[in-house]
C-alpha cells in the first residue's frame, strides 16, 4: 500500500493493486436533527466518528468514544461540530445544522479523513478559506472547498509548496481547469471530440481526438476516453497516468477513475506543480501569467480565468495584511 491510502477502510483489498477499488460507505438517507435517521445510517456515522477519535483527531474526546446505538443524540452532534470547527473552520454545515448525507461536505470529509487519505492534524487558518473563496467564487465552489481545500493544502505542504505564491498557483490552476473546485472528469468539447462524435453519428465515439495523441502516450481507441482529463490538474493521456501511477504506486493506468479521488487529485496537482516548480516561480516573479499557465496546461486554455484568480488572490492578501497590521497598531496603542 502507498504511504497514504486512497481507499476506504470499509473494504478488504487483494494483494494485486489492480484489483483495488475505492468504495466509500453510503447512507440510505440523511442523518441529523429532524432527519430520517435510519439506525443503520446513524451507526455508520457513529463508527466513522469513533475511527477519528481512535486516530486522535479529536484529542479532547479520546476517552469518550460514542456509543454505537443507532440513535442520533447530542453527543454525536457535538462530535461532528468539533470536527467541523477544527478542520473546516465551521463552514461545512449551513445554518449551523449538522446534516449528514451522501455528498454533503461534512460526510465526505469525515469519510476521507477516516480512510487515512491525508494527515489533516493541522488546522488551517480561516484566511485560507477566504482566499480560496475569492479565487474560486460561487456557491458550488464554496461547497466543494469545504471538502477539498484541506487535501489541497496538505498535498502542497507535503511537496514543499505551501508558500503563498504556490498556493495561489494551485488555486488558480484549479479555477482554470475545473472552476467548481472539485476533482472532475473532462467535459466534452471541440478540443477532445470531433464534430461527428459530438453529434453522436454512427461509428464515432467521444474523445476521439485524443486517441492517437502520441505526445500523450495514447495508442488509439479507447485510450482517448480512458485517459481523458481528470482531477484538479486534469491529468490527461496514457503516458501521464502510467508515469504518475508508477511514481505513487497507484494503479492509475488500470483504474484511471482513481485520479478523481480527492487525495489522489490533490497529490497529482501538487506533484505536477513540483515537477515544473522552477519555471512556475520564475514566471510568477515577473508576472508572466501566460508562461506560468503553459507550464501546467501546455497552452493558454482559460488564461484569463487563471490570471484573474491570481490577481484577485494577491489583492485579497494585500488587503488582509494591511488590515491586520492596522488592527495590531490599534491594539498596541490601546495597551499604552
Image: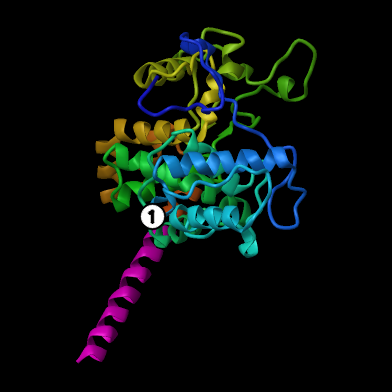
Quadrant holding the C terminus: bottom left
Query: From this viewpoint, is residue 231 visible?
Result: yes
Q: Please tell me how crowded label 1 is: few (under 14), some (14-19), or many (20+) other residues with Cα within 10 Å.
A: some
- The structure's colour scheme is rainbow
Query: From this viewpoint, is residue 291 visible?
Result: no
The answer to whether residue 142 is above or below residue 229 is below
Query: Among all residues in the image, which is located at the extreme right?
Result: 202
Residue 269 image point, x, y percent: 41, 35
The secondary structure making up most of the magenta span is helix
Q: At 40% from the left edge and 55% from the top edge, which residue is drawn?
A: 60
Secondary element at tag 1:
loop
Residue 53 image point, x, y percent: 45, 45
Q: At 37% from the left edge and 60% from the top edge, which residue is drawn?
A: 314
Q: Is residue 42 left or right of residue 236?
A: right
* 20 and 143: which is toward the camera: 20
Q: Is residue 328 magenta?
A: yes
- Residue marked by disc 1: 124
**Chain part drawn in magenta:** 311-336
Residue 67 image point, x, y percent: 58, 45
Residue 248 image point, x, y percent: 37, 22
Quarter-wise, where is residue 21 in the image?
top right
* 284 and 30: which is toward the camera: 30
Q: At 63% from the left edge and 38% from the top edge, which residue is drawn?
A: 44
Q: Is residue 199 magenta?
A: no
Query: Among all residues in the image, which is located at the extreme left?
Result: 336
Amino acid at each position: 500500500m502507498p504511504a497514504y491510502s486512497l481507499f476506504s477502510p470499509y473494504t478488504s483489498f487483494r494483494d494485486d493493486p489492480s484489483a483495488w477499488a475505492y468504495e466509500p460507505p453510503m447512507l440510505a438517507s440523511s442523518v441529523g436533527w429532524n432527519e430520517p435517521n435510519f439506525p443503520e445510517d446513524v451507526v455508520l456515522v457513529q463508527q466513522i466518528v469513533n475511527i477519528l477519535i481512535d486516530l486522535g483527531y479529536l484529542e479532547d474526546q479520546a476517552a469518550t468514544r460514542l456509543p454505537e446505538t443507532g440513535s442520533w443524540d447530542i453527543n454525536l452532534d457535538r462530535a461532528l461540530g468539533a470536527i467541523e470547527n477544527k478542520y473546516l473552520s465551521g463552514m461545512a454545515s449551513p445554518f449551523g445544522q449538522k446534516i449528514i448525507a451522501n455528498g454533503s461536505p461534512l460526510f465526505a470529509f469525515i469519510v476521507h479523513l477516516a480512510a487515512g487519505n491525508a494527515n489533516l492534524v493541522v488546522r488551517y487558518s480561516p484566511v485560507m478559506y477566504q482566499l480560496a473563496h475569492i479565487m474560486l467564487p460561487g456557491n458550488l465552489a464554496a461547497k466543494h472547498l469545504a471538502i477539498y481545500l484541506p487535501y489541497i493544502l496538505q498535498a502542497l505542504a507535503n511537496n514543499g509548496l505551501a508558500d503563498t505564491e504556490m498556493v495561489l498557483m494551485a488555486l488558480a490552476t484549479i479555477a482554470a481547469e475545473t472552476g467548481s473546485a472539485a476533482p472532475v472528469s473532462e467535459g466534452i468539447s471541440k478540443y477532445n471530440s470531433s464534430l461527428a462524435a459530438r453529434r453522436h453519428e454512427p461509428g464515432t465515439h467521444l474523445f476521439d481526438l485524443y486517441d492517437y495523441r502520441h505526445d500523450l502516450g495514447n495508442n488509439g481507441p479507447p485510450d482517448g476516453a480512458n485517459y481523458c482529463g481528470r482531477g484538479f490538474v486534469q491529468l490527461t493521456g496514457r503516458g501521464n497516468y502510467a508515469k504518475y501511477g508508477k511514481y505513487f504506486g497507484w494503479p492509475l493506468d488500470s483504474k484511471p477513475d482513481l485520479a478523481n479521488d480527492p487525495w489522489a487529485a490533490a497529490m497529482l496537482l501538487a506533484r505536477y506543480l513540483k515537477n515544473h516548480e522552477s519555471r512556475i516561480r520564475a514566471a510568477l516573479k515577473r508576472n508572466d501569467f501566460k508562461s506560468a499557465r503553459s507550464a501546467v496546461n501546455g497552452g493558454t486554455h482559460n488564461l484569463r480565468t487563471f490570471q484573474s484568480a491570481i490577481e484577485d488572490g494577491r489583492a485579497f492578501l494585500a488587503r488582509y495584511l494591511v488590515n491586520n497590521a492596522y488592527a495590531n497598531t490599534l491594539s498596541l496603542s490601546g495597551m499604552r
